[in-house]
Image (cartoon, helix red, strand yellow):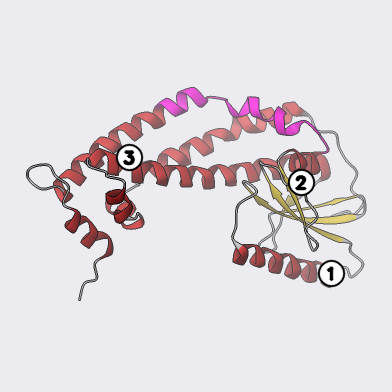
């Protein structure tokens, strides 16, 4: 990489084409994740005491609760990975950046005589203190690795977040750029964070209808299975059986 990499102005048409050609990957992974979901798998992950405390009385309420929580978390991960790919593509077009081969680093690029190493996350509240400590450690290791081959390299570590706001970006040993700051940082375009919204809707209505069809079928299937496995003959939820399945230890 050239530490004095010049900037190539971003062609928004390139971004639109990238999104249109790649957004189906997100939709396919989203639906595939739903199709491979198993009731016993998600039941093991959720707190049965919470359902009881919230006065959950029907199989469908429990099923929708656990499935919707799984989908929300899973979609955030899948789309976060997809946005990371978009950010690397855009940066590659503008600054010649690339997916980093260093552990814990997603993007490397050169600008104004500096080497930027970037870890990309979805939003600003992505990690607890131990996860942030791990990120800092990854930054330190990456700097040592890069300076092995070039001791004069000026390296700047950045935690980039695809959405949100952090008005105190200087964290001491790294910078945290969120939302508009992040997209502007990787592209040189102040309004990119708004410009990418429109192409993201490509095929969204049709693909979402397909997803909703799979979702409805799965809710019906899981509700029937839950009723068979965890309800008494009179239709009442058998909480003892559910808690034993979720938390019981086989001796």
Disc 1 crowd rating (10 Å Cα; few below 14, some 14-19, many 20+) is some
Q: Where is residue 55 in the image (x, y as percent from the top left)?
A: 27, 45
Q: Relative to 193, say whether 45 is above or below.
A: below
What is the C-alpha distance between the residues marked 3 and 2?
37 Å
Q: Are marks 3 and 2 in contact (CB under 8 Å)?
A: no
Q: Quadrant of the N terminus?
A: bottom right
Q: Total marks drawn? A: 3
Q: Earlier in the sequence, mark 3 or mark 2?
A: 3
Q: Which SS does the magenta portion mostly show?
A: helix
The residue labelled by disc 1 is 147
Q: In this view, does 216 lie to the left or right of 235?
A: right
The residue at the point 28 percent across, 33 percent down is 217
Q: Which of marks 3 and 2 is in front?
A: 2
Q: Mark 2 points at which residue?
A: 167
User: In screen coordinates, is 10 left or right of 119?
Assistant: right
Q: Is residue 202 magenta?
A: yes
Q: Assign a secondary structure to mark 2.
A: loop
Q: Is mark 1 on a helix, strand or loop?
A: helix
Which span is picked out in magenta? 188-209
Residue 165 place in picture, x, y as percent: 70, 43
Q: Do the residues labelled 1 and 3 touch (CB within 8 Å)?
A: no
> Disc 3 marks which residue?
64
Q: Residue at x 65, y 28 (%)?
A: 197
Q: Tag 3's secondary structure?
A: helix
Q: Is residue 201 left or right of residue 237?
A: right
User: Where in the figure is residue 50, as x and y percent of width and height?
Assistant: 33, 52
Classify 10 Å Cα crowding around label 3: few (below 14), some (14-19), many (20 and above): some
Tell me the residue at 79%/63% (across/down). 173
Q: Is there a contact, CB below 8 Å, between mark 1 and mark 2?
A: no
Answer whether residue 238 is magenta in the image: no
Task: State the image quarter where residue 244 is shown.
Answer: bottom left
């Amino acid at each position: 990489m050239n530490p004095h990499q010049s900037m190539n102005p971003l062609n928004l048409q390139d971004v639109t084409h990238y999104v249109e050609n790649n957004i189906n990957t997100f939709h396919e992974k989203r639906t595939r994740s739903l199709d491979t979901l198993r009731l016993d798998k998600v039941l093991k992950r959720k707190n049965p005491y919470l359902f009881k405390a919230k006065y959950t009385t029907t199989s469908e309420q429990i099923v929708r609760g656990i499935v919707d929580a799984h989908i929300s978390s899973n979609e955030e991960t899948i789309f976060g990975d997809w946005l990371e790919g978009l950010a690397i593509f855009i940066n590659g077009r503008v600054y010649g950046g690339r997916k980093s081969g260093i552990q814990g680093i997603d993007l490397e690029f050169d600008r104004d005589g500096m080497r930027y190493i970037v870890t990309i996350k979805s939003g600003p509240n992505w990690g607890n203190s131990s996860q942030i400590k791990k990120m800092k450690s990854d930054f330190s290791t990456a700097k040592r690795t890069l300076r092995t081959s070039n001791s004069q390299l000026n390296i700047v570590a950045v935690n980039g977040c695809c959405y949100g706001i952090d008005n105190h970006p200087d964290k001491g040993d790294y910078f945290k750029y969120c939302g508009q700051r992040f997209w502007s940082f990787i592209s040189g375009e102040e309004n990119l964070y708004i410009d990418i919204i429109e192409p993201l809707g490509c095929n969204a209505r049709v693909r979402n209808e397909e997803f909703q069809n799979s979702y409805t079928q799965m809710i019906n299937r899981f509700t029937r299975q839950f009723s068979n496995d965890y309800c008494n003959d009179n239709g009442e939820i058998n909480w003892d059986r559910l808690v034993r399945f979720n938390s019981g230890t086989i001796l």
